[in-house]
Image (cartoon, coloured by chain):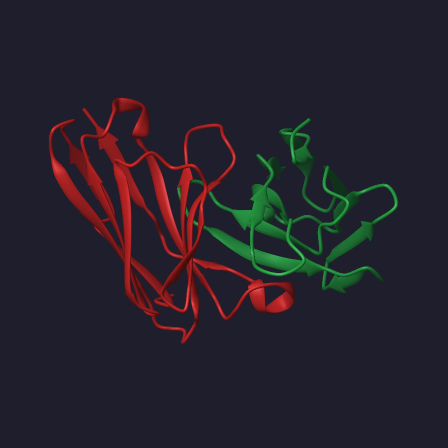
Amino acid sequence: ETGVTQTPRHLVMGMTNKKSLKCEQHLGHNAMYWYKQSAKKPLELMFVYNFKEQTENNSVPSRFSPECPNSSHLFLHLHTLQPEDSALYLCASSQGEGGSFGTQYFGPGTRLTVL
Amino acid sequence: RKEVEQDPGPFNVPEGATVAFNCTYSNSASQSFFWYRQDCRKEPKLLMSVYSSGNEDGRFTAQLNRASQYISLLIRDSKLSDSATYLCVVNMRRSGNKLVFGAGTILRVKS
């Protein structure tokens, strides 16, 4: 499936590096999301964008900086990360918000390792 | 109390068995409910939405009990390919979309 794509699929970075994760959705959806999935923990919502506007920041540290230039693209800029930030970062999109329109479709994720 | 709670399992069942998973949620204002499936090292994929009247999709049946804040998923005639982690997901908002995921229940179907 190519509805939601993410690049890179794997990323190893040092604590002083700056990198960016990219997500693109080809489904014509209006809302996009970043989630973090750490080992043996539930998915944690990080950010929500609806029509390019950020509608949710779930108390995420400022070393994670999202950017949504349009409804199809979402970035997560990373800088001065910590080893505990190592996780699977998942992007998702949905047609709208709420009810059945809120059904989210996920990308394959970026597996991030911070050394 | 966790917002969405699930038994982590694993549930080890033989092929052909019927298995049921339960999930409870803490926010009585929650509006929509879903079951997602996540295979090992893959992204979550929507299995089915859960409606108040209950709904069925082939071998899968989902039930919602708002009074008890409880959701269930029943899988009949289990297949080897059903082996996965099943995530209970609740939208905590009346408007807007804040999905809260349970930690998941692991199912292993064996021949």
For chain A, give the colour: red
Q: Find residue A30 and report its image quarter.
A: bottom left
Res B80 visible: no
Provide residue A10's location: percent of width, then percent of height: 23, 42
Res A27 visible: yes
The outermost residue toward the right is B67
Provide residue A29's location: percent of width, then percent of height: 43, 72
Q: Which sits in the foreground, A81 or B79?
A: A81
Left or right: B51 with respect to A105?
right
Provide residue A79's location: percent of width, then percent of height: 18, 36
The residue positioned 36% from the left and 52% from the top of the image is A108
Q: Which sits in the foreground, A14 or B26?
A: B26
Q: Find residue A51 and report its image quarter.
A: bottom left
Q: Which sits in the foreground, A73 or A66?
A: A66
Quarter of the image that includes the N terminus of chain A:
bottom left
Q: Which chain is green?
A: B
The residue positioned 19% from the left and 48% from the top of the image is A20
Q: How many marks?
A: 0
Provide residue A5's location: percent of width, then percent of height: 31, 61
Left or right: A101 with respect to A30?
right
The residue positioned 26% from the left and 23% from the top of the image is A83
The outermost residue toward the bottom is A28
Q: Which sits in the foreground, B19 or B5?
A: B5
Left or right: B91 with respect to A1?
right
Quarter of the image that includes the C terminus of chain A:
top left
Left or right: B102 with respect to B59?
left
Q: Is residue B81 above or below residue A28?
A: above
The residue positioned 52% from the left and 69% from the top of the image is A96
